[in-house]
Image (cartoon, helix red, strand yellow):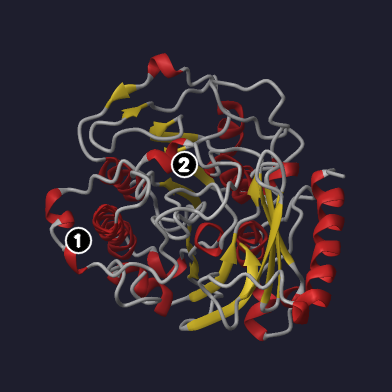
Amino acid sequence: MSCVDANSAQTPVLDALAAGGTHFRGARIVGGANGAVCVPSRAALHTGCTPHHAIEPVAAPMVNGTNVIRASRTLLGEAFRAAGYTTFATGKWHNDGAAFNRAFADGEALLFRGMSDHYNPPLQDYDPSGAYPESRAKPREGFSTELFTDAAIRFIDQRSADEPFFLSIAFTSPHDPRTPPPEWRALYDENAIALPPNFLAEHPFDNGELDVRDEKLAALPRDTAEVRRHIAEYYGMISHHDAQIGRVLDCLEQRGLRENTIVVYVADHGLALGQHGLMGKQNVYEHSLRVPLIISGPGVPAGCVVADDVYSFRAFATLCELAGVHRPESVMTDSLLPLLTASDATAARPHYSHYRERQATVKAGQWKLIEYSPPAERRVQLFDLAADPWETCDRSADPACAEVLAKLRGELADWRRRELQVE
């Protein structure tokens, strides 16, 4: 977002949303045991649980080719639905249909798959049975981001001022294929794009996931011109995405609903796009774990920036507290609101993430450890993020860091046993 980096994608709507609310700049995901990182990450957002506790094990039977959210976990929409809110969704749902129907009483322009072309995407309408077979999906003329926005606006236009609602708009942009409408692609000259300081032609070792689809989107070794083109296309997608969010906020304003509506903007993961020689999200570097998280509306301070590390799925408990909705017992996290008064003890806790069984990381203050396990090349990396925010200088072999390294390795091992049940 341009409120974070003026040289990146231009996002005037999200910048204004951040200025009018609270921006959690340290938000991050926990990762998950799935190569499609969006699946566990979205399940975490909708359950308030770590992915390991939110979804059935990867080895369990899948429904329509995707994971199943545990029946014992109350979903965010489900909690608000029980509190009398009308719940409606549009866009992507990359988990099982039964869970979707527990959360939402209605929906339109629904994508029950991981990705698709943005032009004329295969969409479904709400199915009371919760089945959502792929055979029912039909191409819908238009661009995905605009189609989802149109559906959201139609829903808002039908609301009365005294009818509480919970609306989920799950955009597929800016996921590849990065094909922004031409006028939005034209905003960015790829020849003027600056490469990130941690750009590499190739990742320096086998991280266990160099052959995944995302890593084949650009040739190896990475060509600087090709990576600049990918970034320019990504920025075009983001700016178009930003404008569509503006249409939703304008609709709320026109309907007299904006002042009484809490708006949350969050993503399911980051992306490498040439950083560390990678293109995708199947890693635990900061560029792939960090996500935007903005909350705006009644009860949320304007112009507040929280730099502390926080898990993005704490948004569930936060929304419950803001709206006075009972927080389900199955939610594993607490609200973010104490951070707004600088009294939250969780800010100093280590934060953990993993990618499948191959990569795991712990960040504690300025230090971050990454461990790689087979089928990755077994090794560790240690970064001082205060001095090296782009993770370019591995300090794991530095004798001066031996104590920090040993402490973090112990903490990560304890977390893996406790959370992932991995010895």
Q: Residue at x 19, y 61 (%)?
A: 190
Q: Is residue 346 visible?
A: yes
Q: Nearer the viewer, residue 254 or 291?
A: 291
**Is 349 left or right of 289, judged from the image as shown?**
right
Which quadrant of the rendered structure holds the N terminus?
bottom left
Which of the two discs, 2 and 1, sits closer to the camera? 1
Q: How many marks?
A: 2
Q: Is residue 371 visible?
A: no
Q: Position of residue 378 (x, y in %)?
A: 71, 49
Please rate how many residues cluster around mark 1, counting C-alpha atoms within 10 Å: few if below 14, some from 14 to 19, many from 20: some
**Is 99 left or right of 8, judged from the image as shown?**
right
Which quadrant of the rendered structure holds the C terminus?
top right
Q: Residue at x 30, y 68 (%)?
A: 11
SS class, disc 1: helix
Residue 241 in which image quadrant: bottom left
Q: Nearer the viewer, residue 207 or 423?
A: 207
Q: CA distance from mark 2 to mark 1?
A: 38 Å
Q: Nearer the viewer, residue 308 or 83?
A: 308
Q: Which residue position holds label 2? A: 88
Of the image marks 2 and 1, the number of the one nearer the N terminus: 2
Point out which mark residue 190 bears. 1
Q: Position of residue 345 (x, y in %)?
A: 78, 78
Three-letter code, disc 2: Phe
Up-down relation of residue 50 to residue 21 (above or below): above
Point out which mark residue 4 bears. none
Up-down relation of residue 380 to residue 145 (above or below): below
